[in-house]
Amino acid sequence: LAQGGFGSCSGRPPSSRSVDKMSNVIHVKAYDLRSLTSKGLMEKLDLMKIELAQLRVAKVAGGAASKLGKIKIVRKSIARILTVYNQKQKAEARKQYKDKKYLPKDLRPKKTRAMRRALKPEQKYMKTPKQKTVANNFPKRRYAVSM
């Protein structure tokens, strides 16, 4: 613990060492994935899954610490790829159902159950024929002096 108190001879914190070892890991950025096609995304996903399987084998075999640290990054990359893929699918479905009368339930606004079952504003303020006649025959009184 002589140099810097980090428990190593290099004198730098452990986090900077782990960054050096994992510098060859390719981080997948969501904005880069959005430019790919669905087929391209699936190919990238397959590659990541194969890499994850290899890393897990290395973990069981007692691999290096750099490989163990890489597992998390690959898992997060897989999640990112799947997220972008699902967003693309949903956007495509929205485009397909844009001018249709009915929407699939997963494309409808979520809101709350009570809000979904509530009357629409135009239904809420509709008047019965009798209410309309009464409103016509007995209009609201207007006064010149207001209090």
Image (cartoon, grey):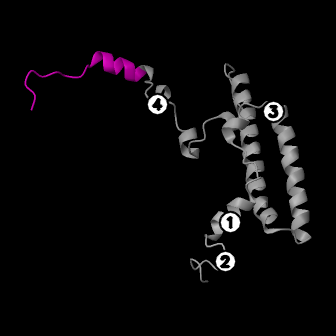
Q: Which mark is residue 124?
A: 4
> Which residue in the structure is indicated by mark 3?
38
**Of marks 2 and 1, which one's residue comes earlier in the chain?**
2
Q: Amino acid at mark 4?
A: Lys
| Quarter in which the N terminus is drawn | bottom right
User: In front of the other: label 4 or label 3?
Assistant: 3
Q: Residue 3, located in which quarter of the rendered image? A: bottom right
Secondary structure under the numbered disc 2 in the rendered image: loop
Whether pointer 2 and pointer 1 mark residues with C-beta atoms closer than 8 Å, the reply is: yes
User: In front of the other: label 1 or label 3?
Assistant: 1
Whether pointer 4 and pointer 3 mark residues with C-beta atoms closer than 8 Å, the reply is: no
> Where is residue 143 shown, x and y percent of the image?
12, 22
> Where is residue 110 shown, x and y percent of the image?
60, 41
User: In front of the other: label 4 or label 1?
Assistant: 1
Span of residues in magenta: 130-147
What is the C-alpha distance between the residues marked 3 and 2? 46 Å
**Of marks 4 and 1, which one's residue comes earlier in the chain?**
1
> Which residue in the structure is indicated by mark 2?
8
Q: Amino acid at mark 3?
A: Ser
Q: Amino acid at mark 2?
A: Ser
Foreground residue among 98 and 87: 87
Is residue 2 found left or right of 122 in the rendered image?
right
Foreground residue among 87 and 3: 3
Relative to 38, does residue 113 appear above or below in the rendering?
below
